[in-house]
Image: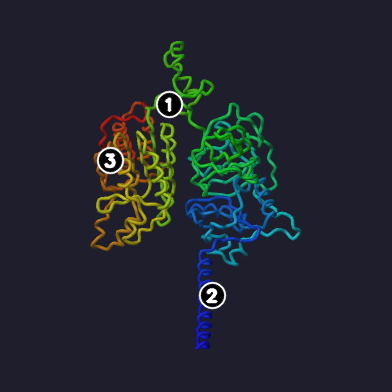
Amino acid sequence: MHQLEHSAARRLKRLGLVLAALACLFVTAIQETSAAVIPGGNSGWLIVASRPNATDAINLARSYANRFPQTTVFQSNNGWYAVSLGWMNQPAGDRYKANLLSSGAIPGDSYFHNGQRFQFSVWSASGVTGGASQSLFASTRITPPPSGGSVPAPSLEQAYVSGLDPRGDNFLSLRTGPSTRYREIARMGLNTPLTILGRSGSWLNVALRDGRSGWAYGKYIASVPGYAPAPPTTSAPATAPPAVAQRSITPPRRGVVGSLTDTGDNFLSLRTGAGTRFDEIARLLEGTEITMLTQQGAWFEIELTNGMRGWAYGRYLEAAKPRQTASPSVPTIGPDTSQQTQNTPGQAQNEAASTSPKLPDLGALPEGKRVALVIGNSAYEYAPFLPNPKNDATDLMDSLKRLGFTVIVGLDQSKVAMEGTVRTYVRAIQDADVALFFYAGHAMQLSGKNYLIPIDAKLEDETAVDFETIELGTVLDYMNAPGRLSIALLDACRDNPLSRRFSRSLGASRSSRVERGLAAPQAGGGNILIGFATAPGEVALDGDEDNSPFTTALLDHIETPGLEIEIMMKRVKADVYDSTRGTQSPWHNSALRREFYFKN
C-alpha cells in the first residue's frame, strides 16, 4: 500500500514538473511574441525624429538613408513611429552623436533610446523588417572603427546660397518644412555656407554652421565639391545667419510650452544645459507657463513659476499673449485710451499697428473664452494623398489664434489620435463662450449621418463605420450647450474613394445607404451654425493652390472687422461660386439666436 502511494506521489510530482515546464515555455513564448526591439547591454537606438503615422516617418527616413544605411522606422507602443539611424554601444554612441550634431547632420533634439517601447520595424534601408531578430540587429548596427575611436560622421554634401535676385528680397528663407507655408526660421544671404542633409521634391533639407537646420528652395542652392564660399557680405547683416552665441533676453519674455504632438512622448525635457547631452531635470507638459531668460542657438534658458531653471528646445516654446491686466512695464496691444486726448484721431491705433503688424488688436476682440478644434487629414494610408487639408487646417489655426481662440489642432491623425484630440477639445470647451470646429479631409454620409475619416481607415467591411470613423454628430452634441455659441465648418466633401470601397463592401442591397457628399445635419436646439464647403449631397474641389476654394475664401473674410458671421458665410459662398465657375456653392444652416463677429 505504501509503495503504491509513493509511486502515485512520484507520478504527480513528475506531472507537476512537466506542467511547470510547459507554463514556463508558454510565458516565454508570449514574452518573445511581444518582445521589444532592444539591442541589449549598454546600447541604444539613435532617434532623430518621431511621426504620428508611418507614411511621414518613412518619407523622412528615406532622406537619411543615403547617408545612413542603417536607417530604420519602428512602430512604438504609443502609436507613433520613430526614425532611427541605427544602434550603437556607449560611450562610442555619444561621441558619434556629438559629431553629427556639430556638423548639423541631425536635429538638436536627437537622442538614444534602449528600444523598450519599439514593437517592430516597419521599414529599413537594409530591407530587414519585423520584430527583434539577429538579422535586424546585424543590419542596423553602427560599428566603431578597429582603433576603438568614435565613428566618423558620414561625409555630407557642402553647398552655398546662390542666384539671388538683388532687385528682390535678396535673401533665401530657411523654413521648418519643404514648402512656403511652413514657418520661416532664418534669412540667408548670398554665399551663406550650407550642408545638404536631404531632399523633398524641389526643396532641400540643409544645416547652417550654427547648428540649426531646416528647408530651403533648391533653385537657390549651389553645390560644388571642394568649394569654400566667402562669408556673407557685411552689407546685408540682417540676412546673415546668426552665430551660435549665448545672449540674454532683455526684458525676459513670458511664454508657454506649445504643441507637443510631434514629440512622441508628449513632454518637453528641461535640461541642465543647451543640448540633449545635458541631464534632464524635469518634464514639462503642454501649456506650462515659463519665462525665457537666455538664448543659445535653438535652445532657451527658462524659469518656471516655481523658480526652477533649466534649458529647453526652443521649437516647442511659444510667446505668451499679452495680458490685458499686465503691469505698465509690459507692452499691451491695442488703442492707448490714456493718450487719445493728446493725439490726433486714430493716431494711437496707427502707431500700434505699425509697431506690431502681425499681432492681433486685442482691443477689437469680443470678451469671452474662445476655443477651436482644427483637424486636417491629408496623408491617407489607403487612399490618394490630399494636398490641401493639412494646409487648410494650419492656415486657419494661425488665423484663429490671431482672433483670440485657444486652438487645439490635429494634423494627419489616425482614429486613436483623432479620438484623443476630440476628447481634449470636449474638456477644453466646458467653460467656453464660443466653440468652433473645423475639419478638412475625407468624410462620408451613411443613412443620413456624417462620418469623419481618419488617415488609417480602410473601410473594407460593414464594421468599419463603427471602428474606423468618427461620427460628426458626436462632436456636435458635445458642442451644443446652454449659453454657448457653436460653429462647425467642414471642408470635407471631396471625391472619396474610401466611401466607394465601403459601398461596394455592403453589397447591392445595402450600398444605397452610402450617398454622395455629406448629409445636411440638423442644428437642433443649440445656438449653432453649421457650414459645408458645398451643398449637401455634392462633392467639393480640393483645389490647385495651397488651399481649397472654400478655405481660401474663409481665410479672406474671417478676420474682416465688423463682419457678422452669416454675412461672412454669404461672401464665402459668392467667392467659391465665382472661383469654381459655378460648380461649387457652399451651404450653411444657422440656428444662432444672436449676432456673432470674429472681430468687432
Image quarter in which the C terminus is found? top left
Q: x and y percent of residue 89 in the render?
A: 67, 58
Q: What label does residue 21 carry, if any?
A: 2
Amino acid residing under circle 1: Leu
Mark closer to the chain start, 2 or 1? 2
Residue 72 location, x and y as percent? 56, 58
Q: Name the element at disc 1.
A: helix
Residue 309 coordinates in the image, percent (x, y): 60, 36
Q: Where is residue 117 in the image (x, y as percent from the top left)?
A: 54, 57
- Nearest to the observer: residue 473 or residue 243: 473
Marks 2 and 3, Cα distance to the nearest angstrom?
68 Å
Query: Badge 2: how crowded within 10 Å, few (<14), some, or many (20+)?
Result: few
Q: Foreground mark, 2 or 1?
A: 2
Crowd rating for badge 3 (residues with CA inside 10 Å; few <14, some 14–19, many 20+): some
Q: Do the residues labelled 1 and 3 touch (CB within 8 Å)?
A: no
The mark lying in front, picked from 1 and 3, is 1
Q: Using the image, determine if residue 242 lies above or below residue 215.
A: above
Name the quadrant containing residue 164.
top right
Q: Which amino acid does label 2 sit on?
A: Ala
Residue designated by label 3: 587
User: Depth check: 74 or 10 in front?
Assistant: 10
Using the image as rendered, state which of residue 204 and residue 69 is in the foreground. Answer: 69
Query: Quick one: SS at disc 2?
Result: helix
Q: Distance between the residues labelled 1 and 3?
A: 31 Å
User: For residue 362, which numbered disc appears in the image?
Assistant: 1
Q: What element carries label 3?
A: strand
Image check: 507 left or right of 311? Answer: left
